[in-house]
């Protein structure tokens, strides 16, 4: 009676399974692929034999639930923390944005004022908008759920340079949508809960191993509880008797359980439920309304280091005003080549390009950001397109994001998870972990979402609460 089927082995499915196992239930996690991690995983490149991440995934200090999951998996020590970010500003050296030992929200003030990338006028305008975000508070941003963030930028008089050099790089990277498309509350959350809440909250964490390795211990943790993880098992549908979900139909037959947690994306879930089942549960009525935004990851390998100048080697680089938003320095690999990982979010315009054209555009951005790299050509390039990387967190989307619980109506033993569900976050690993924890708590009656990292006392007193 305590057996629960978890459909999907991404971050949400892993999070749900771990919490189910800890509560004494027996999760049966079914994953189509031969590995865990979903979109936040790695693959073995058939060309080179290297294990490459699908895309660079980042956690922030404010991401309390994904870090809790890493703690439970015993891999938190594989996250390397970077308190500072580097912003390209050629021909000058990159600007460094690093928090000072000052109470939030003033911890970035000195570094922000020293940024040569931004004019004095732009800094004043950005500061005024930040003050407005503080005074809005966390609850106030919900009034912007039906309006694009660009409207807020217009109301606060942000100049074209301020948008292009500061707001756009942050919002596109965090929300995978440009400012004129993303819901205002989701973009505001990025600044309120990281930049303004405290120095730790804005600290960036990067995995020191391939993403796939972060989930290895999940298998033993689930199996020790009497559960099981079945990789390479495709779910064909959810069995429904008119009232309850009896189990799932797989390639190998029917798998029965007391409850089902679906963690797959909405379009995939729509193919698993029958029309009678969709009609019986209001949470399933809007699955077709979710749209998606792509991300492009590009791995480049050089014979010489490229993210460096005559002063230092940079672990990463923000590229304000360019189509490539980030470069990450992955260091020297086993073959002796220097590995750089480029990330292009909201990459709709890139999806039809072939790898040669992609490499040319990324290389142009790299040479712009690091003039000393001009003349260096990668000896290997591997591009990875995630055409449906995240749901589009556009205005009004929160109205149709479903809860984990069926509520008073719906299929009573069907629970939903995934970053597209009602997590209060945009499409992130943090949102996925939250959804998995919420679904497991709805099944077991224990546990739940880990509390947010609180804003600093001064920031709360000023209104950031």
Image: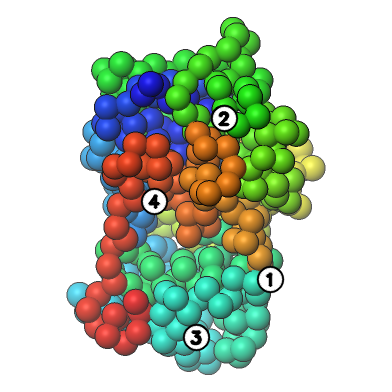
Residue at numbered disc 4: 59
Residue at numbered disc 3: 129
Does residue 236 sit above or below 58 in this rendering? above
Quadrant of image for the N terminus: top left
Dot 4 or dot 1: first in sequence order is 4
How many marks are shown on the rendered structure? Answer: 4
Residue 419: assigned label: none
- How many angstroms separate mark 2 from mark 4 (CA)? 37 Å
- How many angstroms separate mark 2 from mark 3 (CA)? 50 Å
Q: How packed is label 1: few (under 14 Cα within 10 Å), some, or many (20 or more)?
A: some
Residue sticking out furthest to the right:
352
Residue 180: assigned label: 1
Dot 2 or dot 4: first in sequence order is 4
Residue 316 appears anywhere in the view: yes
Asked if the residue at tag 4 contacts the one at tag 2, i.e. Cβ–Cβ closer than 8 Å, the answer is no
- How many angstroms separate mark 1 from mark 3 (CA)? 16 Å
Residue at numbered disc 2: 244
- How many angstroms separate mark 1 from mark 2 (CA)? 42 Å
Please give the name of the residue rendered at 41% of the width and 63% of the height, measured from the top-left corner: 86
């Amino acid at each position: 009676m305590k057996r629960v089927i978890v459909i999907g082995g991404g971050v949400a499915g892993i999070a749900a399974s771990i919490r189910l196992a800890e509560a004494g239930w027996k999760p049966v996690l079914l994953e189509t692929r031969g590995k865990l991690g979903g979109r936040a995983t790695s693959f073995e490149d058939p060309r080179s034999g290297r294990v490459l991440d699908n895309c660079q995934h980042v956690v922030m200090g404010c991401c309390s639930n994904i870090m809790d999951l890493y703690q439970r998996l015993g891999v938190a020590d594989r996250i390397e923390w970077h308190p500072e970010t580097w912003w390209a500003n050629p021909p000058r050296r990159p600007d460094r944005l690093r928090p000072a030992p000052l109470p939030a929200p003033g911890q970035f003030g000195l570094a922000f004022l020293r940024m040569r990338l931004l004019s004095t006028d732009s800094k004043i305008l950005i500061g005024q908008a930040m003050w407005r975000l503080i005074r809005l508070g966390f609850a106030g941003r919900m009034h912007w759920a039906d309006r694009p963030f660009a409207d807020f930028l217009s109301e606060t008089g942000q100049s074209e340079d301020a948008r292009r050099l500061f707001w756009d790089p942050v919002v596109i990277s965090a929300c995978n949508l440009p400012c004129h498309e993303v819901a205002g509350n989701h973009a505001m959350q990025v600044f309120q809960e990281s930049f303004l809440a405290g120095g730790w909250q804005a600290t960036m964490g990067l995995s020191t191993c391939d993403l796939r390795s972060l989930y290895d211990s999940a298998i033993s943790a689930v199996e020790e509880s009497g559960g099981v993880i079945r990789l390479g098992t495709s779910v064909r549908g959810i069995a429904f008797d008119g009232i309850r979900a009896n189990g799932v139909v797989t390639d190998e037959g029917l798998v029965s359980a007391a409850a089902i947690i679906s963690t797959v994306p909405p379009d995939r879930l729509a193919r698993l439920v029958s029309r009678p089942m969709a009609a019986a549960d209001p949470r399933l009525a809007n699955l077709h309304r979710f749209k998606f935004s792509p991300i492009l990851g590009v791995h480049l390998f050089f014979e010489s280091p490229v993210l460096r100048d005559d002063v230092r080697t940079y672990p990463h680089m923000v590229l304000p005003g360019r189509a490539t938003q980030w470069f990450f320095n992955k260091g020297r690999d086993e073959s002796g080549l220097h590995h750089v990982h480029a990330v292009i979010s909201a990459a709709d315009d890139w999806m039809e390009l072939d790898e040669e054209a992609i490499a040319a555009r990324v290389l142009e951005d790299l040479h712009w950001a690091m003039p000393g790299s001009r003349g260096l050509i990668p000896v290997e390039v591997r591009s990875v397109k995630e055409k449906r990387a995240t749901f589009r967190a556009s205005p009004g989307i929160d109205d149709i994001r479903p809860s984990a619980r069926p509520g008073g109506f719906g299929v009573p033993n069907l629970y939903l998870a995934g970053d597209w569900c009602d997590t209060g976050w945009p499409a992130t690993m943090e949102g996925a972990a939250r959804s998995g924890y919420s679904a497991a708590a709805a099944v077991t009656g224990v546990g739940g979402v880990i509390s947010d990292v609180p804003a600093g006392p001064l920031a709360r007193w000023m209104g950031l609460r």
